[in-house]
Image (cartoon, helix red, strand yellow):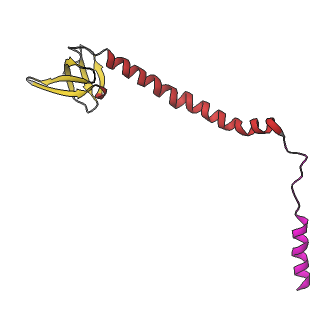
Amino acid sequence: MLELLNFTVTEAYAMGPAPQGGQPGGAQGMITSLLPLILIFVVFYFLLIRPQQKKAKEHKQMLDNIKKGDKVITGGGIYGVVESVGNNTVVLKVAENVKVKFGKGYIAAVRAASDED
């Protein structure tokens, strides 16, 4: 039994602190450890953030250029013709004698004048 106990104690003493000579030091080590995070952020920016910002800018420009007579599609899929445009609202004619007021942000697309109803 003592031999078994002596063996485990010997193993415990055999484990020592990690050697200090091989570790990179200072700023170089910090830059090396942050490099993967920086690379991931750059990839996310070019694949996700930048295209989303571009699409939002194009949508805002489209909303600013809406005028009476434009054929549009709402976010809910309703097709209509613009009757009047306010600061935040658009009145659409969706059928004969049927006009509906929508928030400007819910206009999804402006259709070409040649599109059929």
The residue lying furthest to the bottom in this view is 1
Q: Specify whether 55 is left or right of 116.
A: right
In front of the other: 70 or 89:
89
Q: Residue at 23% across / 23% down in the picture?
A: 90
In front of the other: 56 or 76:
56
Q: Is residue 79 above or below residue 12?
A: above
The residue lying furthest to the left in this view is 97
Task: Inspect this view and state whether residue 49 appears.
Answer: yes
x and y, in percent, of residue 45 in the image? 56, 29
Residue 16: quarter of image: bottom right
Q: Quadrant of the N terminus?
A: bottom right
The residue lying furthest to the front in this view is 87
Q: Residue at 46% across / 22% down in the picture?
A: 54
Task: Inspect this view and state whether residue 116 appears.
Answer: no
Q: How many marks?
A: 0
In front of the other: 12 or 104:
104
Residue 27: quarter of image: top right
Q: Residue 20 in magenta?
A: yes
Q: Residue at 88% across / 45% down in the picture?
A: 22
Give, as a single range, the part of the protein colored magenta.
Answer: 1-24
Q: Specify whether 34 is left or right of 10.
A: left
Q: Is residue 52 above or below residue 9?
A: above
Q: Residue 4 in magenta?
A: yes
Q: Residue at 23% across / 15% down in the picture?
A: 70
x and y, in percent, of residue 64 in the image? 33, 17
Residue 29: quarter of image: top right
x and y, in percent, of residue 43 in the image? 59, 31
x and y, in percent, of residue 44 in the image? 56, 33
Q: Quadrant of the C terminus?
A: top left
Q: Specify whether 34 is left or right of 15.
A: left
Q: Is residue 53 above or below residue 1?
A: above
